[in-house]
Amino acid sequence: MINFRTDLALERRDLYKKANNIANEVEGLETQEENVSEDIKITRVKVLNDNGEKAIGKKKGNYITIDIKNLKIASQDDIQKASETLTRELKILIGNLAGEQEPILVVGLGNLYVTPDALGPKVVQEVDITRHLLTYMPDALDKNTRPVSAVSPGVLGTTGIETLEILKGIVENIQPKLLIVIDALASRSIERISNTVQIADTGIIPGAGVGNQRKELTIETLGIPVIAIGVPTVVEAATIAADSLDLFIQKVQKEAKSNEFLNQLQEEDKYEMIKEVLAPEEYNFIVTPKEIDDLIENMKDVIARGINFAIN
């Protein structure tokens, strides 16, 4: 079993193909790509059967990756274009799982006071909430308005309660037809940090990408469909070292034209080799970029706008 150490289905697919020397598609998976613009690309990975599940360790369903370039210097127009792309993909998934006026609960996972983990709570603060208005001020809204509620349940370390336990109680009481869960993810690529959004209709296992796995939030555990929206905000030190070696090798190859040793080194999976060196010394830190504050703010706007236009 491959130690993927990433939450992204697309990265897991690529790692599986590399580890097994597969040139074409992995059996049990289906992949489509779409270039929305020069800066936005969509990759849709569908896990079709048990073979696909076993290969990449993801449940059967749809995993949509939206890559957004240059988000750290994004203008408001760039953020709006990215949110429109998210809205389009999200609307399709929601339409397959809930009716136009059926209630939705938006859940922001994470810790508001730890910036790389604050995405979920920040998005929830920007979501247009309507459930209480429909109850207490029905004349103020259109009669076709969907009931939307939201919550940030915090983290186990500060509440002492598993997120699943909290959400089970809320779902039982307010009876939404669909959950939309936002969380920070882990990636195996530096360039994806806060520049990628993954949408999945299979739910989520919080903390899985960084080895801090909590109880899963899925239709099996909550009794209603769960759409997960995640953004990678951290990578391991081993990933940074491996990516840095790739850049180093490319530079040397460019200057030296040919080198059998370097060619061989570039083809190998350096991540596991580097991790073996770092892990015993507890140096395999989870790392986030210095611009994470700005990146989280931009991505928060992309996701909140995308959700608001998709559900209302």
Image: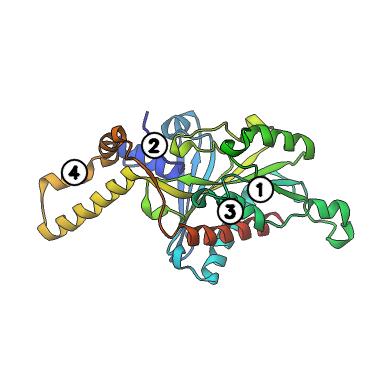
Asked whether the viewer can see residue 203, the reply is no
Q: Amino acid at mark 2?
A: Phe
In three-dimensional space, the C-alpha distance between marks 4 and 1, rounded to whole angstroms, equals: 45 Å
Q: Amino acid at mark 1?
A: Ile
- Secondary structure state at the residue bearing disc 4: helix
- Secondary structure state at the residue bearing disc 2: loop
Q: Amino acid at mark 3?
A: Glu
Q: Amino acid at mark 4?
A: Leu
Q: Nearer the viewer, mark 4 or mark 1?
A: 4
| Position of 205 relative to 95 (above/below) | above
Percent of width and height locating residue 66: 49, 54
Label 1 neighbour load within 10 Å: few <14, some 14-19, many 20+: many
> Of marks 2 and 4, which one's residue comes earlier in the chain?
2
**Residue under the point 18% across and 43% down:** 265
Q: Quarter holding the C terminus?
A: bottom right
Q: Which residue is mark 2?
A: 4
> Of marks 1 and 2, which one's residue comes earlier in the chain?
2
Quadrant in the rendering for residue 159:
top right
| Dot label at residue 89 | 3
Percent of width and height locating residue 114: 52, 49
In three-dimensional space, the C-alpha distance between marks 1 and 2, rounded to whole angstroms, equals: 28 Å
In three-dimensional space, the C-alpha distance between marks 4 and 3, rounded to whole angstroms, equals: 39 Å
**Residue under the point 89% across and 60% down:** 139
Q: Which residue is mark 4?
A: 265
Q: Nearer the viewer, mark 1 or mark 2?
A: 2
> Of marks 3 and 1, which one's residue comes earlier in the chain?
3
In three-dimensional space, the C-alpha distance between marks 2 and 4, rounded to whole angstroms, equals: 20 Å
Q: Which residue is mark 1?
A: 94
**Contact (Cβ within 8 Å) of mark 1 with mark 2:** no
